Amino acid sequence: MAAAAEIQSEDRFAAWPRGRARLGLLALVLLLLAAVLTPVTKGAQRDAEKHEFGEMKRAPTRSADLAVYDHAAERIAKGENYYAFIAEEHRAVNYPLRPGVAVRLPTLAYLNAWLGPTGSRIAALALLAAVLAVWWRRLGESALWRRWRHFACALLFAGCSLGLTDEYLVLHEMWTGLLLALAFGLHRPGRWGGALLAAGLALAIREHALPFVLLMGAMALWRRDWKEAAAWGLLVALFFAGLAWHMAQVAALLRPDDPVSLSWWAFRGLSGWTSNVVLSGVLRYLPKALAAALVVLMVAGWAGWKSPAGAFGTLLFLGYGVMFMIVGRVDNFYWGAVIAPAMFMGLVFAPRAVVSLTRAAFPRS
């Protein structure tokens, strides 16, 4: 009886009043229909086929983006300074240098150079194993999901699968996504040191980790954990200081004829969210309408888990979803790799969430 009560307490939708549950169910059905009808924009699909996580390929086996990152690591390994050559590398493939954020932060290039190809491969596998381990433990703390953690971790593994591909060891979004999944799994209210370190490294690799860090800080403020909130705030301050330094270094390299990046304000709507997640991982091999519906169900699953992790995951994935609807061109679809790993686990939570919401909406008399 105690176990059943504990499981019931983790079911968010079970206690919802009928009217609210019906509105929630209607919203879910409409969102699923919209996702199925607009699963992937033609532009995003075309770019996925031609680019493979980068700009137009110069050779059948390697994208220009990834080749630039390869060259950066190779040149650093030979003793060169990142800012001494990065403008040259961008100009060689006609990549923009304006604004400064069009040039990647140097963190991953130095890590790849120091580790080398074999070391980077070992580090990626170790990080993937750590992500699986922390979530195995995290789900084991839940009476509701303890028995299903085998399936949850299998889905997590699918979401992290980019980390198994040598080709993407220089992809910033791959490392950022794994590190954020690790930070998410490590975090507990009152125990956040490991999460702070993992998220800090993710933020140093790719600025797209910033919404995760900001949400962590906001949730700490909501809990009135002033010490944790201050720690996340300090991390944000350090990031902006580092970003300002990076942009100053890039600005010193500019020439009048250097191109300006196309605007990232694309306003792609729902397809921007679903396309980014679908095309940045294994979902791209499914029928696109089905894959887009699964993205929506992932978030519905997280929303049904009444826990700090469930609340954080729901806000996190919805927040990134809104961002992808507004910001990011069709050739930026690989941004979805930043959130895909942990998001996949929502599919394990989704069946119970949908059943619970339906029962709350139409209770037996």
Image (tube, rainbow, N blue to C red):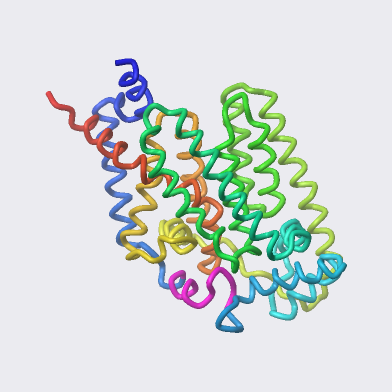
Residue lying at 66% horizontally and 54% vertically, measured from the top left: 123
* Front one among 166 and 254: 166
Answer with left or right where residue 124 lies relative to residue 23. Answer: right
Looking at this view, name the residue that lies furthest to the left.
365
Please, is residue 334 above or below residue 156 in the view?
below
Residue 22 at x, y percent in the picture: 25, 35
Quadrant of res 119: bottom right
Residue lying at 57% horizontally and 51% vertically, measured from the top left: 177
Residue lying at 71% horizontally and 32% vertically, measured from the top left: 231
* Front one among 204 and 326: 204
Residue 242 at x, y percent in the picture: 79, 50
Quadrant of res 71: bottom right
Residue 276 at x, y percent in the picture: 48, 60
Answer with left or right where residue 32 lies relative to residue 328. Answer: left
Please, what is the dominant secondary structure of the magenta stretch? helix
Location of the C terminus (image quadrant): top left
The magenta segment: 44-56
Please, is residue 289 above or below residue 315 in the view?
below
